Image (cartoon, rainbow, N blue to C red):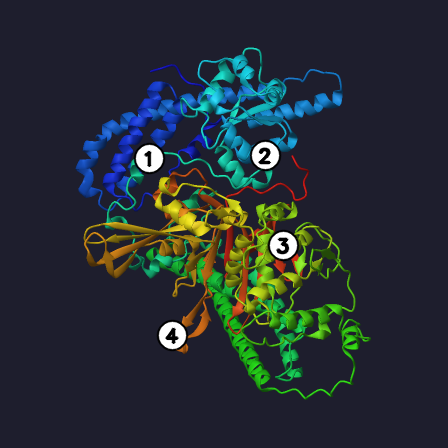
Amino acid sequence: MAQLKKLHMTDNLDTLGQLSNITIDLRGKSTKMLLLTARKLFMTAEEYRLDGDEELAYISYMKYFKVITAIRQKPDYQSHKVQVKEALGDTEANRRIMDSLELITDSLSMRYSKLQKQTTALHSQPEPIRNGGGKALKSATSSTQATEYTRLGVVSCQELFERMHEKSVLVMDCRSSADYEKSHLTYVCAFNVPEDLITPGMSAGKLQARLSSSAKASWASRSIKESVVLMDWNSKDAQPAANTAIATLLDILKNWDPDVTYRAPIQIVEGGYEYFIMMYPTHCTNPSVQAPQQNNNDIETIDDIEYPSISDITMKEDISPRDFRPRPDVNRASKQAALRTYDQAKPIAEIMRDQAEFLQRAKHNDEQLDNAAKMWKSLIQQKSPSSDLSESDRQLLYKILQLENQAEDYKIENNRLRDDVERLKTSQTVAPQQVSPKEVEATRRIEWEIQQRQRRDEQYERQRLEREQQLTIAREAKKHYKPPSPPPPPPEDASQNTESLLKPTTNGDADLDLVLEESLALQEGLAFEDGQAEKPTFDRTTKPTSRPRSVEKTATRARDFSPVEGPNMGKGLTGLKNLGNTCYMNSILQCLSNTPQLTEYCISDQYKNYISRSNKTNGQVIEEVAALIKVLWNGQYKCVASRDLRYVVGQYQRIFRGVDQQDSHEFLTILMDWLHSDLQTLDVPRIRETIGAAEKAWLDFTKAKESMILHLFYGQMKSTVKCVACHKESATYECFSNLSLELPPNANECQLSQCMDMYFSGERIHGWNCPNCKTKRDAIKKLDISKLPPVLVVHLKRFYADTSNTGAYVKKQNYLNFPLQNLAMNPYIARAESRAGTPKTYQLYAVSNHYGSMEGGHYTAFCKSAHYRRWFKFDDQVVSYLETPNVVSSAAYILFYTWLPPAAPVNSVGL
């Protein structure tokens, strides 16, 4: 065995164990393929062990045993025992491998302990006093931070970005000079060490002599910076591949630079410039560049074939309704809770505690809902069926919809308690003599409370149906209502008419905003060639008599956001006024406003460099979105109006210019296409003959011009069709800006992962023209993601046409459990994407909610502010704090996930 290599992966066994996780879903892989993978992992582990690299040996051994576990859990394991023994040896052989792993684990534990003691001792050493005590103190603090940064041989893009803000790091970019000129960091302490100047065997002095004059000055600062990091296109490991420029440069700086003592170990940027430009595009000179294509021959055995056999594909018909049973929430801090299975009963004390907490929350919601219902009943009795709802009436209705939705969620929680009691009673029948009278009485009490809650739920359902019937009657009455004709106006000339329109009314019930709103509505009707638009109606009684103005001028007009000033304002915490059923638009705009990379792109005015004036929308949509985001993030106003944006989108899509409620998903999809088109000016030159089918499809979609919106929100779907006769595969590719997932029709509660499983499962098709068989065949169709976007938007298909009810649209009220953190997309990606270096795990940062039904509904947004690091609720003009447990609800309609780190605070000082 060779001499032990230096520790380079981490500084503790826990982190090393995390690196040993297998991100690929092994459940659908064949036993034969798992055996090949296990054999390869064992041979790799042995090579690392003999080479003295204990960390990589540990990782490979751990992965080996995890694959072995997956093999033993396969349904056909018994029939493959002989092959398993032949390929991997008997039990004694695996015991010897386990002994090797234990020896490595003990050795690493001792080495990590020694390393941590050395780090602690280094932190405790006093900093020598130099001239300027304040600077010495700052240097000591930076030195401590640098030591923390250097625990790994690699540095993440997020950590590098933080150090760039401190200006404590020197970045050596060893890409080619041509690539560096096309795009590089805007950071002042970054410079290019061209790869063609780096050759093996040269010293640091010889390399310095080859650099340009400006690069030499930066090179000389490597001895005074707190840390030095190296960057190429896409290296990820502390030990990059041999004979690469970055590996040679690392060797020169470590071993052939005797005149410099580095303050911290040299690190490599994880993922290279390719990662950094995706995470922080506004801090790169040209975010449109693409990393050069690589021939990746080091492919895991398990990924050699997209679908080794049809039997490896999970079919939609194989997913039964019981697969959508809610999975129990397990308290992993409690060993007893973690060991409990689906069918094991909770203790009576735990059920009592859960019910007491639940009833306390439900009681508060009941009180609010009862009060709101009384106010609504009184309101309906006073109004005529044909009269419009005022703004305050609509706000009351929206509040009732949200409270009823919360009551529905409590109904599901009550059903969970009922199931817990049923399991408890079943377990008590096994040994009834062990059940005390107190437990029997407690069980009865719990059941009584459950029944009381069920009766309350039935009451709320009757109230909801009654209110929907009232709204339906009011809508029908309004259709047939003919208002009396107004008296003819006195004769006036055109100039007097225009002047009178611009004068506010004397009683204060209408102001310039209303006149402008009606004027814009009339202009919208003239903007279309397909007919005269119906003039929308507006409620003049709910507008304030005066308001401050915030006007931003463009080349053609002035914007009026009609802001309302108020206390407790913060960046990104400004509400949006409801301009007449525009809550669907407000919800989406708040979600986009809380997308940090898009917000920074708009506020920094970088978008202005890429506006297209040759498309359908002429760059107007991105201009209005950017202007609105700037106002939302200036931290000055309680709420503003998005009237200008509404007018612009209404010009190009007539359904958005009226006062009828629209679908927020439809608005989001169209808005994404418009924003991409408005910014589609980034040239991406490629040679079509040298790229694969997926890249060709991407190029056909983008037409060799890309945008910041495309880089953030757009992914690519691969549709594979496999013939059941000859097993010939045929693939097509399609770009997407969001995934639309079906919800199970007969499940009140389900998991997002279950909906994903259903969406990406195989589907049997008939009459497919097989290009190999030259005839029609049955085939299997399977979807996989061939390109994951940095921001993944998931749409839940809650609305469907009910064929049993004349095709009328009905809403599914399923309670969907979705993760706030660590949404793993590994099981749903194509083979090529699994080899890509981009992250596959996402974090939730925004939710667009829909309350109510097709008869009447309301939209809100839940967003996690990157600035304040907490959740907020955006309900039109009202913004409030939101407790994290309340983010998941049955109102969730569109989910926004990202693997990008939170951006720097908006309006931060440039690097």
* Residue at left offset 79%, top offset 66%: 546
Residue at the right extreme, as displayed: 506
Quarter assignment of residue 217 = top right
Q: Residues within 10 Å of mark 1 (few under 14, many from 20)?
A: few
Quarter assignment of residue 616 = bottom right
786 on left or right of 598:
left
Q: Are marks 1 and 3 in contact (CB under 8 Å)?
A: no
Disc nearer the start of the sequence (1/3) = 1
| Mark 1: amino acid | Ile
* Residue at left offset 53%, top offset 43%: 900
Mark 1 or mark 4, whichever is nearer to me: 1
Determine whether the residue tagged by mark 1 lies in a helix, strand or loop: loop
Determine whether the residue tagged by mark 2 lies in a helix, strand or loop: helix
List the residue tagged with mark 1.
299
Determine whether the residue tagged by mark 3 lies in a helix, strand or loop: helix
**Residue 671 image position (x, y, % from top left):** 54, 58
List the residue tagged with mark 4.
803
> Spatial distance from mark 1 to mark 2, Cα to Cα?
31 Å
List the residue tagged with mark 2.
161
> Spatial distance from mark 4 to mark 2, Cα to Cα?
55 Å
> Spatial distance from mark 3 to mark 2, Cα to Cα?
28 Å
List the residue tagged with mark 3.
623
* Residue at left offset 59%, top offset 83%: 478
Q: Residues within 10 Å of mark 4 (few under 14, many from 20)?
A: few
Determine whether the residue tagged by mark 4 lies in a helix, strand or loop: helix
